[in-house]
Amino acid sequence: MARRQSTAARLPLAGVRVLDMTRILAGPFCTMLLGDLGAEIIKIEHPQRGDDTRSWGPPFKPYERPTPSTFPGESAYYLGVNRNKQSIAIDIKQPQGRAI
């Protein structure tokens, strides 16, 4: 009996890596769809405040770990359009950030 491929390997964009430098609405929604189709999405966020939409709410999902944020958690909107993504905070205004 032949082994079945994993679902992720059968998606049309499996193996594609996308650098997501978008924010607010249209861009994150687009990269969400690319992730749904199997692409690996790496989201670049502001090093101090992260994505602006983290604070759009209610509703909020409470933080699981202590955080210096003044908000009660991450917004449902942010969690929805940023599924299937990995994120990293980089200051691309600095030479070290651009070097990455």
Image (cartoon, rainbow, N blue to C red):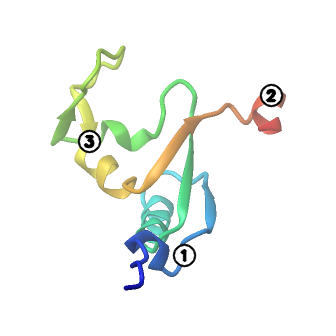
Mark 3: secondary structure:
strand
Among numbered discs 3 and 2, the one appearing first in the sequence: 3
Vertical side of 88 occupied by 48: above or below: above
Q: Mark 2 points at which residue?
A: 96
- Residue at left 50%, top 64%? 31
Q: Position of residue 50 (x, y in %)?
A: 48, 34
Please indicate whether residue 56 sits to the left or right of residue 4 in the image: left
Give me the residue at 46% from left, 79% from top: 10
**Residue drawn at x 30%, y 55% as measured from the top left:** 80
Q: Name the residue under label 3.
A: 75
Query: Distance between the Cα atoms at labels 1 and 2?
Result: 30 Å
Q: Which residue is drawn at 46% across and 40% down?
A: 51
Q: Nearer the viewer, residue 23 or 61?
A: 61
The residue closer to the viewer here, 4 or 14, is 4
**Rendering quarter of residue 83:** bottom left
Tell me which label, 1 or 3, sits earlier in the chain: 1
**Mark closer to the observer (1, 3):** 1
On the question of residue 54 being in view, the answer is yes
Q: How far apart are marks 3 and 2 (CA)?
A: 30 Å
Identify the residue under disc 1: 13
Q: How far apart are marks 1 and 3 (CA)?
A: 28 Å
